[in-house]
Amino acid sequence: MNRNPAVVPRSSLTRGEFLRLGAGLTGAALLGAAGCGVRGAGQGGGGGGGGDEFTIRLSHVVTADDPKGKASQKFKEVLEKSTEGRITVEIYPNSELYGDEDEIQAVQSGGVEMIAPASSKLTDIARQLLVLDLPFIVDDTSEVPDLISRDSTVGKGIYTNKDLADNNIKVMGLWDNGLYQITSNKAVRKPDDLRGQRIRITPSDAIQAYWNKWGAKTTPMAFAEVFTALQQGVVDGEFNTYSNIESQRFYEVQKYITISDHGYLTYVLAMNNKFFNSLPDDLQQAVVEAVDEASAYNREIADTVNQEARKVIEEAGTSEIIELSSEDRQAFKDAVVPSIWNQFADDIGQDIIDELLARKS
């Protein structure tokens, strides 16, 4: 009988389970080493340089070719070069290590040092982040940098969010993946076309509220499960950016894509707060600078990656792309703005809602 619960036959594990077991054992080892004062295992505690070496495991749920995947690689390259190998970054894409359902807990517990979830995944912990799930907060990606900068009203509420800090989560950066489009097996040209359709959503009260307002039946679901759910008819449609629709092959199992541009997909680059604080001061600064460079790169490439993804979808010819007229898009907007924005003012802050409304006036 195997009396050691940490020793599991390799053949009985999926790749993800095997990687998570390794991550758990590594995390336990690091915690033990830190308790013994071994700085190279994560017990930095501020101060100057030194020869300590650290590993950052960055887990995310999309492919390496998506804007988030490319930005993760840029972060790795910049940080490893600037620290001359004192920090090594290991990237686990495509839910390889942790998925939607467990990545938040993993970063809180130290099962992984960094994650980059959609902002909606953090709204159960920090209700103020619902602001990023509001419909039509931007009409064009050019509005994004000002909206979420560290100095903006919205940005300050995220970067310095107390609820996240109290849950051992430090916001390092905000990445984006473009604007949302609607995919479905039924042509969608007006809100009434969504009535009764089963739409997969990311877990968010704000997202659920506006889809319900349009008449859809919402089904929260992990990102890794969406393709199969669409293929098997568990849900009728979903919404996503072009890059995700293409990289996850949703266009292969959906007849229509409606260019709604109704929302903005934000990723929160989040780090285990205790791990960050364990780094020497110079390495903390190096991490911040690498994040800033990767964030700038992310914004440079996001539009291009989405445009290239649209071309792939158009060439495949499996989905009809529906371009909404300005009047038709306005009908979607009028159904949810400002009513949904005001519905969540107590969570987000009336001052932020007022500022967003002023931007649109």
Image (tube, rainbow, N blue to C red):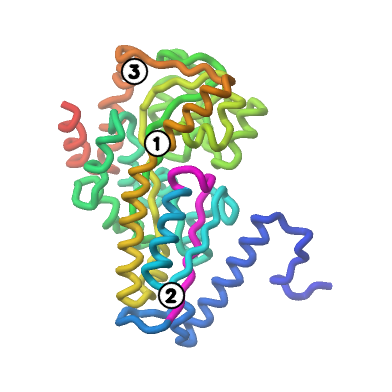
Could you say whether the residue bearing mark 2 is in a helix, strand or loop? loop
Q: Label for residue 329? A: 3
The answer to if 53 sits in the magenta stretch is yes
CB under 8 Å between discs 2 and 1? no
The residues colored magenta run 52-68
Task: Decide which of 58, 193 is in the foreground and name it.
Answer: 58
For the point 39% across and 30% down, the residue is 209
Of badges 2 and 3, nearer the viewer stands 2
Three-letter code for the amino acid on which mark 1 is drawn? Thr
Residue 205 image offset from top left, x and y in percent: 40, 37
- Place residue 346 in its image quadrant: top left
User: Which comes sooner in the sequence, label 2 or label 1?
Assistant: 2
Residue that mark 1 sits on: 304
The relative height of residue 14 versus residue 193 in the rendered view (above or below) is below
For the point 41% across and 70% down, the residue is 275
For the point 48% across and 70% down, the residue is 55
Task: Decide which of 258, 110 is in the foreground and name it.
Answer: 258
- Place residue 241 in its image quadrant: top left
The answer to if 70 sits in the magenta stretch is no
Three-letter code for the amino acid on which mark 2 is drawn? Arg
Q: CA distance from mark 1 to mark 3?
A: 23 Å
Q: Is residue 160 visible?
A: yes
Of badges 1 and 3, nearer the viewer stands 1
| Side (left or right) of 15 relative to 354 | right
Neighbour tally class for label 2: few under 14, some 14-19, many 20 plus, Cα within 10 Å: some
Residue that mark 2 sits on: 86
Q: Quadrant of the C terminus?
A: top left
User: Which comes sooner in the sequence, label 1 or label 3?
Assistant: 1
Neighbour tally class for label 1: few under 14, some 14-19, many 20 plus, Cα within 10 Å: some
Task: Decide which of 351, 145 is in the foreground and name it.
Answer: 145
